[in-house]
Image (spheres, coloured by chain):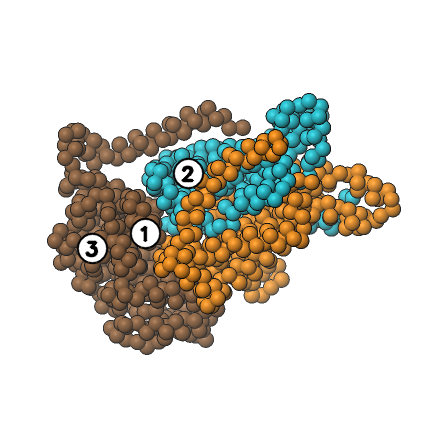
Amino acid sequence: MNDRRSAWLLIAPALLLVGVVYFLPLARVLAISVMEPEPGLGNYALLFTSAPIQRVLLTTLRICVFTTSITLVLAYVVAYVLTHARPTAQRLMMLGVLLPLWMSVLVRAFAWVTLLRRQGLVNNALIGMGAIDEPLALMWNEIGVTIGMVHYMLPLGILPLWAAMRDIDGRVLAASRGLGASATQTFVRVFLPLSLPGVIGAGLLVFIFSLGFFITPAILGGGKTIMVAEYINVQIHESLRWGVGTMIASTLVATIFALMFALSRLVDLRTLFGAK
Amino acid sequence: MNPTRLTRSVGWAVICFLVLPITIVFPVSLTDKRYLSLPEEGISFKHYVNLFGSAEWLGSIGQSLYIGVVATAISVTAGTLCAIGCWRLSSRAGEAVRAMMLVPIVVPTIVYALGIYRFWVDLRLLDTYTGVILVHAVTGIPYVVVTVSTALAGFDARLEQAARNLGASAFQTLRRVVLPGILPGVVSGAIFAFIHSWDELVIVLFIASRAVFTLPRRIWDGINEHLDPTMAAVATIMIALTAVLLVLDLRMRRRKEG
Amino acid sequence: MIKLQTFAEDFAEIRALGRRGVLGGAAALGLAGASGAARAQAPKEVVLCNFGGDAVKAMTEAFVVPYEKKTGGKMVIDGSGPSNGKIKTMVMAKNVTWDVADSGLGGTGELGPAGLLEEIDYSVVDKNKVLSGFAYKYGVCNYMFSTVMAWDTAKVKEKPTLADFFDFKKYPGKRLMRKDSQAMYELALMADGVPKDQLYPLDVPRALKKIAAIKKDLLFWGTGAESQSMLRDGEVVMGWLWNTRATLLQRDTKGKVTFSFDGGLLQPGLWVVPKGNPAGKQVWVAIASMQEPEGQVKLLAALGNGPANPAAAPLVPAELKPLDPASPDNVKVQAKIDGEWYEKNYARTRQEFLDMIAS
């Protein structure tokens, strides 16, 4: 009993801060979704009747799924190499992971523009090498948005995966090999399952983070790849359809909780986030 | 269990992909044009001169550092304690708290910005350091909760039990046993929280006007105007500083070990 | 790593510097010497909000300095960007911090009908100092700008017509539009053959159809700087953008990208006053002061925004005349936007445009 009380004491400061400074003001805003333009669920009906809103949500979902899958695979490889690298190589890799974090998301987006546009460095290099005749459309579409987003998300995926892999007991793996399992078997049967909590944690983090992504799609999408955050932004800043904007935001929050719930049925969330 | 050569190449290729935009930022910062571009007729240091000669840019960097450091301290403290608390609870309630802590990441920032604006009006915190720091601290907590929770997932709970059984107080156990065990998680949480504050634009555009002018706002101002390359100079310096710190750290470790 | 002590000191120093800078500026304007008693009687401070960047400095020289000299009052510029959403938030929270905001028909069209703006007081603000048709109930024109066609002379050898914008056989390559319906509908309709004096009421479905047909070859710009870089970097061959940005492009590319007012749309930049503004009636004095032609010509020289006051025309230097969207020669070849139509229809038709892009 005492243990439970002390646990809640540890939680209290964060809960208080987030509750008062985050949820209170947020709740007041989300309430707008059933208040404006008139009280009722009219805004939510748009989810089923408005083709543009459905289209925006689908585009967002598609880009987020691609981004999360690509990020997870690449981040897993990096974290794996990182875990097994010698200290010097490890430091160097860490440098590569951490350095991009110091570039403002705005600067990064424009760096990608310089690299990927029609007459950008990548296309010019490829044409120079004779690999292609016509410049590839790498920018101002979903490809460009995905490249930019994967780049942003990679450190977010690598760091938790690495933290999870570091803690895998090397002796377990050695035992597996010692008992005659091949390297592949050991990886698939022992290492992968042990790293799974990290994978799910990182995947969830990357996915929900991508859902609300705003600046990168706005700059790299050529104005046409409209993701949900940008749509909401326009509703709030320009067209003043606050009811619609907050309705979509509420829907996102509900989606995330549904996702967490579904995950908790598939895997034990307790193994996912701490505890046993 | 060493990675094969192919795996290792892919890993390093990803690292190259990560640093690719950095390699472009340095030449862009030396452009002779007044907009973001590669140097055309020659290189120029005018954007560095502009950066160091302008009280506005330096002021913004100072403000962002100050806000970022204080906000991170709050996020890390509250977030780490919260993650440990949830881990100890290991119950539905703990999971619910953790799920709740994720909400600030998923809700589009603009929506929250609208709400906090109304709130800060009531509390007279608009355009103040306290207002911005509190907001950045609170929205930084989720990163810490996630990374620390992930680290805790790999932490052997029996170690904590053992320490308690050997007579350590709860506080001693936390400081001497749990925290060192999850330090990588705490550190990466702190990094994320700081970067979050350092890079945050959408809320600041809403709740700050004349007194608080953070670095992202300054960059945004320059982008709207003419894609001001000064932001490339800022990025170059930040990257160089980070690289130097990391290399120094590497050297010190070597000396200790050698 | 970072020594916090030293940093805190530096930080205090930086803040002090900032404050000194402000005071120094005030001294230069001859204000610092004002006695306490005089200051107490001075009119309320007027806060002008614009979109930042070069406009802060330009408007300070064009508007703030003359206003302060003339009235002894104080005017400050907040460059944090007066979006409709922010104005609505302020008014609804009853904590308005801006007196006058740099807006347009997008502001009056969305905010005016919602009751979030003060009606312009034309007993103080002079309607005669505004080009006819650009003084509205909720906003008064302060400068003119145009949406014009700009093109890349490397790929488009002859001066293109609006119809060429839609002709991909003649000129292959991407086209550029604004991510907003204002002026895009008008230019599309003119390209489709509607005469420039018969545009209103706009045939929105026809314009939408025309634009949607080439959507896959369109890029959309959000900020003025973005529109410049798309043309400068050769991402598009033609684009519809603000004359202010087109002028800069022409200068930056040494004429490789050029533009014409032919077939453009003349639009007003409007001052709007959020409901319950802090300086009260003093704001009308400030707006009236900004109607003086001298300041407006300064703004033209600095930013390329045309004077709204017709009396400014003789003051415009010869070399600036071809670049002035409001000069009689340029007005002749352009269509004029209809503010009344926008007040009634903007909110709805803009959303239709955005939905067309999104779907």
Q: Which mark is residue B132?
A: 2
In which quarter of the view is residue C280 placed? top left
Pointer 1: what residue? C88
User: In the displayed structure, does residue B83 sit left or right of residue C215?
Assistant: right
Tell me residue C291's x, y (percent).
17, 52
Q: Residue at x 26, y 56 (%)?
A: C115
A180 is higher (above) or lower (below) than B76: below
Pointer 3: what residue? C119
Whole-Å distance between the Cαs marked 1 and 2? 21 Å
Q: Residue at x 55, y 59 (%)?
A: A61
| In-front residue for pair A23/C276 | A23
Classify mark 1: helix, strand or loop. helix
Q: Callout 2: few (<14), some (14-19), or many (20+) C-alpha neighbours within 10 Å?
A: many
Tell me residue C334's x, y (percent).
26, 67
Q: Give the amino acid type for the residue marked by disc 1 in the picture.
A: Lys
Q: Which chain is orange?
A: A
Q: Which chain is cyan?
A: B
Q: Which chain is brown?
A: C
Classify mark 2: helix, strand or loop. helix
Dot 1 and dot 3 residues touching (CB under 8 Å): no
Q: Chain of mark 2?
A: B
Q: Chain of mark 1?
A: C
Q: Chain of mark 3?
A: C
Q: Residue furthest left?
A: C123
